[in-house]
Amino acid sequence: MTALPNQLFNQVSILSLRCFVAVVETQSFSAAARQLTVAPSSVTKQVQLMESAANVALVHRTTRRVSVTEAGERFYEHCLAILNEIDNASVLTGADKQVTGHLRVTAPPAFAGAMLGRHIHAFMEEHPAISIDLSVTSATPDLIRSRIDVAIMLSDQPQSKLTHFCLGSCTPILCASPDYLTHRITPKQLDDLNHLECLSARFSELAASWRLGRQGCWQTVTPHFKLLSDNGELLRQACLGGAGIAALYDFHIQDDLRAGRLVRVLPKFEFASNGVFAIIPHKTIVRPQAKVFIDFVRRLVAEPGINRRAAGPSLRSDDVPKMA
C-alpha cells in the first residue's frame, strides 16, 4: 500500500481509526455511527480523512452497501493492532477502567441457549460499554472473513488451526423422558440401544456411532438414529416429547434431570468429555472485549454442578495467545 505522508497522517486521530474499523466490521456507515454513538456524518468525515491521508480508497460505497478495498483490508489489520495496543494500554494504566467497543461472537445453539442466553445479561451488566453481536450457528464459521472476535466450539480438539483456548469441558449424557421409557424396554446393556429410537447431533462424531465406557473399558455401538439434527435445542425438545433416547450435553439438560423431565439412561456408562474452546482469529491480537468475554465464559463453564475438565488460567491484558 502507498506509504502514508506524515504531514497528512498526522491529522488522523484515534477516532478516525475507530470509525474506519467500525465501518469495516459493520459494513455500514450508519451502523458504525450507532456503535460508536456519533453522528453518521462524523464517521463519513473521519473515513474520508483517512483516505485522504493514505491517498487511496479504503472502502467502496454504493447506495445499498459498503465493501472494503484490497488496500482497506490490509490497512484494517494494522488499525486493529494499533487500537488493540491503545486499549490494552488504557486498561493497564487505569486510564479507562471500562472495556468498550463492539464484540462479534458465534456459539452453537445448545450452548448459546442453555449457557449464554440465561447468563449474558450478567456480562452486559459487568461491561455496559460493550455491545455484542451473537450469532448462533452449528456451522464452523470463517472467523477472518466474517470478522468474528470469538467462536465458542465444543469438540475433543478443534479442527481449526487458529489460536484457541480450552475453557473447560462438557460431557454428553444418554437420557430420555420417563414417558418414553414406560412404553419401551429399559436398556440395561449397550446392545439394547439397537432396539430403541435414538436421537443425536448431526455433523459430529456422535452422528456415526456412540462410544461409551464403563470402568475404563470402552465400547462402540451404532444404534438406529431416528432423528439427527444440528440443533441441540431441537433434540432436547424432541427428547422431552418422548421421541427417543438422546445424547445431550450435561449443561443443556441439568435442569431437566433435576426436575425429572428427563432421566439418565444406562447411567453406569459414560461418554468421553469434550472441550469447550474459545477460538480467536489472530495469533497475536486478542481484543480487550474478547479477553473479558472469554474469561466470562470460562467462569460459566467452571460453575459447580457439572464435572469439568480443568480450564486454563484467565487471560491477562498483556497475554500473547499460545496454541492450546
Image (cartoon, rainbow, N blue to C red):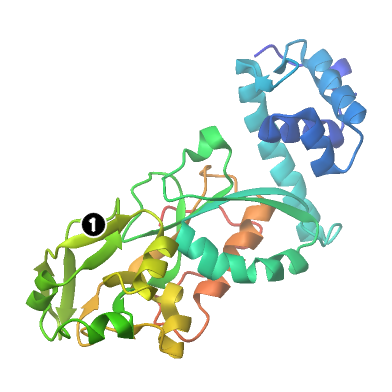
Residue topped by disc 1: 207
Q: Tag 1's secondary structure? A: helix
**Furthest-left residue in this view:** 191
Nearer-the-camera pick, 151 or 285: 151
Residue 289: % across, % down = 68, 54
Figure check: 50 above or below 134: above
Q: Nearer the viewer, residue 8 or 70?
A: 70
> In this orientation, does residue 314 appear?
no
Classify 10 Å Cα crowding around label 1: few (below 14), some (14-19), many (20 and above).
some
Tell me the kind of residue under disc 1: Ala
Q: Is residue 13 left or right of residue 213?
A: right
Quarter the C terminus occupies: bottom left
- The reply to whether residue 65 is visible in this rendering is yes
Residue at image coords 22%, 67%: 198
Q: Vertically, is 92 above or below 6?
A: below
x and y percentages locating residue 94 in the rendered image: 83, 62
Q: Position of residue 223 (x, y in %)?
A: 14, 65
Displayed quadrant of residue 121: bottom right
Residue at the far front: name it.
183
Which residue is pictured at 60% across the width and 65% down the height?
117
Q: Quadrant of the N terminus?
A: top right
Query: Is 197 above or below relative to 100?
Result: below
